[in-house]
Amino acid sequence: DADVTQTPRNRITKTGKRIMLECSQTKGHDRMYWYRQDPGLGLRLIYYSFDVKDINKGEISDGYSVSRQAQAKFSLSLESAIPNQTALYFCATSDLGTSGSYNEQFFGPGTRLTVL
Amino acid sequence: GQQLNQSPQSMFIQEGEDVSMNCTSSSIFNTWLWYKQDPGEGPVLLIALYKAGELTSNGRLTAQFGITRKDSFLNISASIPSDVGIYFCAGQDLPSGTYKYIFGTGTRLKVLA
């Protein structure tokens, strides 16, 4: 089974709809992240969380919100989706401790979101 | 914001050839990571580098952390068709603290059999 899972894998929605993307991990990592990927722009950080009580904005947080329901779960919401939020969304995790490995991020398979 | 330039953007190579790609930063990084992304999948970590000057191999892949801490390169030797994909570098921005990863825009590799 995959260590980092995302649901749904694909979603088509309409402008103005509320959308929630889910991420779950079985790696036991404290840190979780949401990224957005657009062609030619690489990965850009939306939000990140160091533990259940910690939520931080990334470089492109406008129009998004997150919820860290448990150590293993981190959800991304689009309160009112707009077409320029059409993109590939990735969840990632990383470990807090262990010298030499705590900087490595592990990615989920991605959610392809299309906003019409 | 922090900029991370990755080149080339794309490349076509013949099977068996060696490949080289690099990333440069406008400021110092304390960690460099190299990822590969296959179509429809998330990026998968290939190599992680933690010290300036460090040279690390993973099979046919070799990556180095530049001495200036502002660059890194990835080499793939004797390429094969399954090397096709997008390769991303990522750096952890030292002045910004321990959380922020900056990603390059990717190098799209196509291998001609």
Image: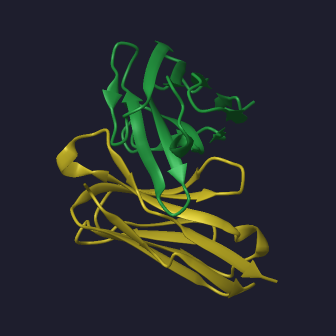
Which chain corresponds to the colour green? A
Give the residue drawn at x 51%, y 65%: B106
Q: Is residue A41 above or below residue B55?
A: above
Picture layout, residue B9 above or below residue B96: below
Query: Residue B45: where, in percent of width, then height?
Result: 55, 52
Which of the 4 quarters of the picture holds residue A64? top left
Q: Closest to the observer: B91 or A23?
A: A23
Q: Is residue A68 above or below residue B19?
A: above
In this rendered view, identify the residue nearer to me: B97 or A33. Answer: A33
Determine whether, in the image, residue A100 is placed left or right of residue B27: right
Classify the position of the C terminus of chain B by image quarter. Answer: bottom right
Q: How many discs appear? A: 0
> Can residue A30 be seen here?
no
Point out the residue furthest to the right here: B113
Q: Position of residue B69 (x, y in %)?
A: 25, 65
Give chain B's shade. yellow
Vertical placement of A106 versus B89: above or below? above
Identify the image's colour scheme: rainbow, by chain, secondary structure or one colour. Answer: by chain
Q: Residue at x 68, y 86 (%)?
A: B13
Q: Position of residue B1 (x, y in %)?
A: 25, 54
Q: Residue at x 54, y 31 (%)?
A: A81
Residue drawn at point x = 48 percent, y = 26 percent: A29
Hey, which residue is sitting farthest left in the picture?
B95
Query: Which is nearer the eye, A84 or A45?
Result: A84
- Which x, y percent locates residue B48? 45, 55
